[in-house]
Amino acid sequence: MYFLGKMGGSIPQIVKGTPGLGRVGKQDLVHMIDTELRGYEREFKALNIHLFDEVLELISYVERVLSKPGGHLLLAGRAGVGRRTACQLASHMLNKTFFSPSMSRDYSMKEFKRDLKLILQKTGVEAEKVCLYIEDHQLISSEILEYVNSLISAGESPGLYSPEELEPILSTLHDELRNQYEVKTTFELFVRRVQKNLSIVVSLDNSHPQFLQHCASNPALYNKCSIIWHEGWSREAMRQVAQKEMKDELA
C-alpha cells in the first residue's frame, strides 16, 4: 500500500474533484499520478518519467512531506535518480509553486537574495504555497545553505532585509494582524506565514566531498527535515525502464 497526503486531519486533494486521500492501492495511485503527470506536461514540459514501483514510492514519500504545513525535505543520494522530477510533480499535485534558482555564469549571492525575497513575499505576504528546491550545483557559496538553514529552523533569514526594505512589506499585514490572536507583531505574523506556506527541499549528493560538512554546519537539514536517502534504482527497476523504453520504440 502507498500513502498520500497527511494522515489525519485535512488531507489535500490529489485529483481535483475527488475526495482527500490517505492510504491508497497501487492501481489508484498509478491512475492519480498519471493523471497529474499528463496535466503537468500539458501545462509545463515533459518530465520523461516512468511510473514503476520505486518511482511511485519516491513520489508518495515526497508528496506526504510536502503536504504538511512547512514540511521540509533533505534528499540525500546520487544525482540523476529523479528527485527533482518527483518534487516538481508532487508540488503540482499539491498546487504549490515549484521554484529552483535558474543558474547562469553571472548568478551570485545578490541574485539568490533577490530570489529569496521574492519567495518570502509570496509565502509571507501573499500566502502562496511554494516549494523551494536547492541542489548541489546551486551552492555557489556556503552562505546559501546558511540562509536556507535559518529559514528551515526559524522561518526567517537574519540580515536578508534592511529595515527600509522590511517596513513596507510588513505594513501590508497591519489589517490582518487585527484578526490574529497568536502573534503580537506584523513581523511575527510574516514569519508564521512563511513557516506555514514555504517548503524547502535540499537535494545533496552524498558522494560529494563537502556533504558531511554541509550537514554538520547546517543542523536544520537533519533535525528539522524529513530525510529520504536514495542512491539509485534497483536492477529490477532498471529492467522495467528498459522494457518500457523498448516497447515505446517498437510501438
Image (spheres, rainbow, N blue to C red):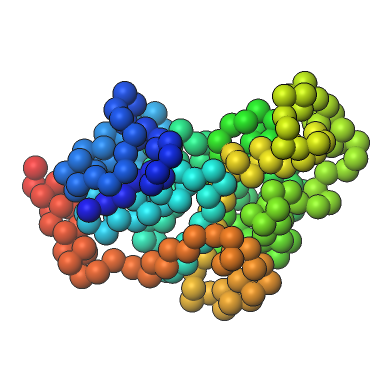
Quadrant housing the C terminus: top left
Furthest toward the front, the residue is 181
Give me the residue at 26% from left, 37% from top: 32
Q: Is residue 224 left or right of residue 205?
A: right
Q: Is residue 153 left or right of residue 83?
A: right
Give me the residue at 38% from left, 54% from top: 61
Q: Position of residue 40 (x, y in %)?
A: 36, 34
Q: Quadrant of residue 15?
A: top left
Q: Quadrant of residue 91?
A: top left
Q: Please tell me how many numbered marks the rendered image carries.
A: 0
Q: Position of residue 95 (x, y in %)?
A: 46, 33
Furthest toward the right, the residue is 164
Give me the residue at 77% from left, 24% from top: 178
Q: Is residue 38 visible?
A: no
Q: Position of residue 216 (x, y in %)?
A: 64, 75
Give me the residue at 15% from left, 52% from top: 244
Q: Is residue 232 visible?
A: yes
Q: Position of residue 213 (x, y in %)?
A: 63, 76
User: 107 or 143: which is nearer to us?
Assistant: 143
Q: Is residue 191 left or right of residue 7?
A: right
Q: Quadrant of residue 217?
A: bottom right
User: 148 or 235: which is nearer to us?
Assistant: 148
When the figure is inspected, residue 85 is found, relative to residue 12, above or below; the finding is below
